[in-house]
Each structure stands twice: as structure tokens, then as C-alpha cells.
Image (spheres, grey):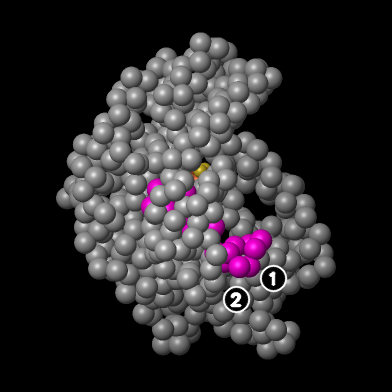
Amino acid sequence: MHNEIDLDQINIHSEPPAEEPARQYYFMAKCRERVKDFTLKHGRVPTSCVVNMGCQMNARDSEKLTGILEEIGYQKTESEEADFVLYNTCTVRENANNKVYGRLGCLNRYRRENPHMLIGLCGCMMQEPAVVEKIKQSYRFVNLIFGTHNLYKFAELLYTVFENTSGGAQKDGHSMTIDIWQDTDKIVEELPVERKYAFKSGVNIMFGCNNFCSYCIVPYVRGRERSRKPEDILQEVRKLAADGVTEVMLLGQNVNSYGKTLEEPYTFARLLRDVAEIDGIERIRFMTSHPKDLSDELIAVMAQSEKICRHLHLPLQSGSSRILSKMNRKYTKEQYLNLVEKVRAAIPDIAITTDIIVGFPGETEEDFKETMDVVCRVKYDSAFTFLYSRRTGTPAAAMENQVPEEIAKERFERLLCKVQQLASQKAMRLEGTVQKVLVEHVNEKVESLVTGRTDNNSVVHLPGDKSMIGKILDVYLKECKGFYYIGEAR
Ligand code: 5AD
Ligand code: SF4
């Protein structure tokens, strides 16, 4: 989606404006001059690559960063041999951090071959002081580090990098621009954002998280929960619809508590109803729900509206009430099961997916069996399963009885096996039915096929061509192949 502000109208020789987003457009205009200089000097447009390493929220942030780079004049590439590479990192599990260090080693090799190359790091992992310290010590070639709270200042920070480097190359080999904020309550609207697909888009409705689940680092790296104003969200969705978008995914760490922190409180159910009224929007998805906040009002709105997709991602985390209490999840096994029952009674064909952590401190075989029990009863359409990862600074990291890795891994394997077995049985239920499928892209492997999703998020491959992309078609699901269907347009 593009903004109405024309960079050519900005006087880059004046002082920068104090207010946002005008200040960022001023720096975008200044950066664009640098990109033009590069193009003249080297006879080519510089390339940029934003690598997304995290969740849907991170993916949306990456679209914002790419949107700004496009506005500045960079040419987007998927290759990490670009002139500017920006890693948008995740830190929810320790292995995500380790991957970044490994990949930085590779980038350094590319950088030696391209003296103009600039390297930036941002996202959740950068909110951890120990990480920034390590990068300062061991990865001195990195040019820019910023976090999750000042992402909107990207253009300004990039300009500082340009100032600290000469025409793209580093002046002294170790000038690093670092700007990490601890928190913010500011939400800057109207910045450019990349439109990856013509027909679907994510829309942030809130930022941060107040739940403090005891294993989770997110509240520390994404800050306190704050909601966008409903009128700003609806305005964005209206613009997207006018641009041809038919599917929106409303994004937040805990969408069910949307609006609680607004001056005039608003409910998520009400927001969904408002979005459903926008002409042109055919499908509405949302992520992520917390079982403790899922209201009857929301279930009723989902049941009534044709536009709200019949899919609910409802993280369980553990099936043991004892562990759930230690996790600070604020629901019991029974309450979770009752909730699922209530949702299914209101919306019988709904797909339910989940997240489960195995090996939380103190988890016994009995606790694990409770998790397996919930999995067998709910029969999830799919489940993301994770080995517990000890995150420094979270309450769980200091808990006694950390589960030995071999035991956790063995439980994880058992869980994964059960989840997959149940999910593939579950998938069979749509075989032989006609479903509405939004065609998303031409199949990567077979050119004569296109790939899309049903309302309840199942993947369908069907014969077709690129003219079908973005259309919602009636598709007969001929055959279930485990985790996807082969279909035929009706
Ligand atoms: N260890 C393992 N998994 C975790 N998650 C969050 N924190 C941790 C952790 N410390 C999982 C949760 C969450 C998902 C996004 O990541 O299941 O829902
Ligand atoms: Fe998303 Fe959490 Fe990872 Fe940040 S730490 S990218 S919020 S999953």
C-alpha cells in the first residue's frame, strides 16, 4: 500500500520535522538521494534483501521495512549477496539466535567480495542486551542494529548509516549504528508498506503483550500491549479493499484482548464485525488467540459472519493444569476443553490449530500424558510442537527441575507422531466436498497447477493458471493427500 506523501515535494535541505510520520518521509527523501548517487556512480541500482526469521508479526514488520526500502529506491532481491541485507530476527527459542550467528558468518564472506555491502540486524533478538554485546564484540562488520520499538525510525537510522559510511562502504571498518529502545507507547501510522500479494494482506491491530507466560520472552522484547485505534485499522482495511485485497489477516500477540488499553475500550468481536462490513473484503483471518480471553461475543460473531474464516489458532501449550499454572496461562485443562466444545457447538466445521511446548520445567510423564490426552480429544487440524527452550530473564528459566534433553526429545517425538496421525485422519473429512478456495499462486513444482486455501486454511492444488490468482473459486476436493488436497474448479 502506498502513501500519499510525495518524496519529491520534500525539502531535504531544511531541518528535519519533529513530528511523525513526516520526519521519516524527510529521511526517506534524504536516503533516496544517496541511492541515486550510488546508481550514478556505479551504473546500477543498489539491491536490498530483508530476511524474515520470525512469526507473522515479524513478517508484517519485514513488509514495512521492505516498503521503506522500495520508497527509497532500492531494488528488492531474494539474494543475501545484496548491497543492503537486513535480518529481521526472532528470539522466541534459543536455536533461532544461534542460526543468526551462523548466517552472519556467511554474510561476512559476501561482504568481503562486495565492498559496498551494508548489513543490518533488527527484530526481537536485538532487544536482548547480551546479543547486542556479542555482536559488538564478535561481528564488528555489522552496520546497523535496531529493535522492535523504533522500527518506524528505520529511514532515519539508515540515513545515519549512510552518514557513517562513505557511499556505502564503511569508513573505518567498525562504525556501528545502534539504537535500541526499552519500550514505547507510540504507534506511527501511514508509513509505506510492501504489498507482497495483490489480494491478501496482514494488518496489525495491536502490538506487544501483557500476559507474561513464564516461558516466554515476547513481553520483554515486544513491550506492553497497545492497540491501534479502530478507525485507523478500518481506514487501512478500506484502502486495501479499494486496492483489490479480498483477504485480511488481523495480527496481534493476543488479539482477543484487543482494545482493552484504548481510551475508549473496544472489543475484538466488534472490530471483526466492523471489518466484515467493508465491501470487497471476502475473508477475515486472525492470529493469535489466548484461550483465557476468547469471549462468547467473539464466538457468536464468528458463527454469524460468512466472511470470518472458520479457523481458530488456539495455543494449548500444555494439557496439564499443574503445568499450565506454572506457565501462568490462567486456564485449566478442563476450561480449555470446555472452550473447544463451545466453539465447535457454535461453528461445527471450524478448524482448530494449536501450539504445544514439551519439556517445560517440572513436566513429569503424568503431565505429558495430560497433553497427549487433550491432543487426542481435540483432534487438532494441525499443531506446532516445540521443545521448551530456556530463555534468560523469563521466570521459567530460573525454575527447578529443568527436564533433561533426552526425555524432552523422546516426549516430543511421541507428541509429533500423534499430532500428525490425528491431523491426517482429520483432513480426510473434506474429501469429496466442494469448498471455496482462494487461489494464491502458481504451484512451485508443477506449472500446470495452482495452489490455494480453503476457508478453514487447508491447502489445495488444482489445475489452473496465473489468471486464477486472487480469485475465490468453488473447488471439488477430489483427493486428500495427507496435508493437502487435489481439487478441481467447478
Ligand atoms: N520454548 C519453546 N517454545 C516457546 N514458545 C514461546 N516461548 C517458548 C519457549 N521458551 C512457543 C509457544 C508460542 C509459540 C509462538 O512459541 O508455543 O505459542
Ligand atoms: Fe514473533 Fe515472538 Fe519471535 Fe518476536 S520473538 S518474532 S514476536 S515469535
Q: Nearer the viewer, residue 354 or 164?
A: 354
* Residue at mark 1: 83
Instruction: Report helix, strand or loop for mark 1.
Output: loop
Q: Is residue 333 visible?
A: yes
Q: Is residue 371 visible?
A: no
Which residues fall within the magenta stretch?
Answer: 442-461
Q: Which quadrant, please, contains the C terminus?
A: bottom left
Q: Are marks 2 and 1 in contact (CB under 8 Å)?
A: yes
Spot occupied by residue 130 in the image (x, y as percentages of width and height) = 62, 39
Judge from the rendering whether residue 408 lies leftward or rightward of residue 309; answer left or right: right
Judge from the rendering whether residue 306 lies leftward or rightward of residue 202; answer left or right: left
The amino acid type found where label 2 is placed reads Tyr
Q: Residue at x 45, y 34 (%)?
A: 380
Which residue is at the far left?
264
Spot occupied by residue 12 in the image (x, y as percentages of width and height) = 48, 83
* Residue at mark 2: 74
Q: Which quadrant, please, contains the N terminus?
A: bottom left
- Residue 488 highlighted magenta (yes or no): no
Q: Residue at x 63, y 26 (%)?
A: 413
CA gap between label 2 and label 1 equals 9 Å
Spot occupied by residue 95 in the image (x, y as percentages of width and height) = 65, 38
The amino acid type found where label 1 is placed reads Asp
Q: Nearer the viewer, residue 120 or 326?
A: 326
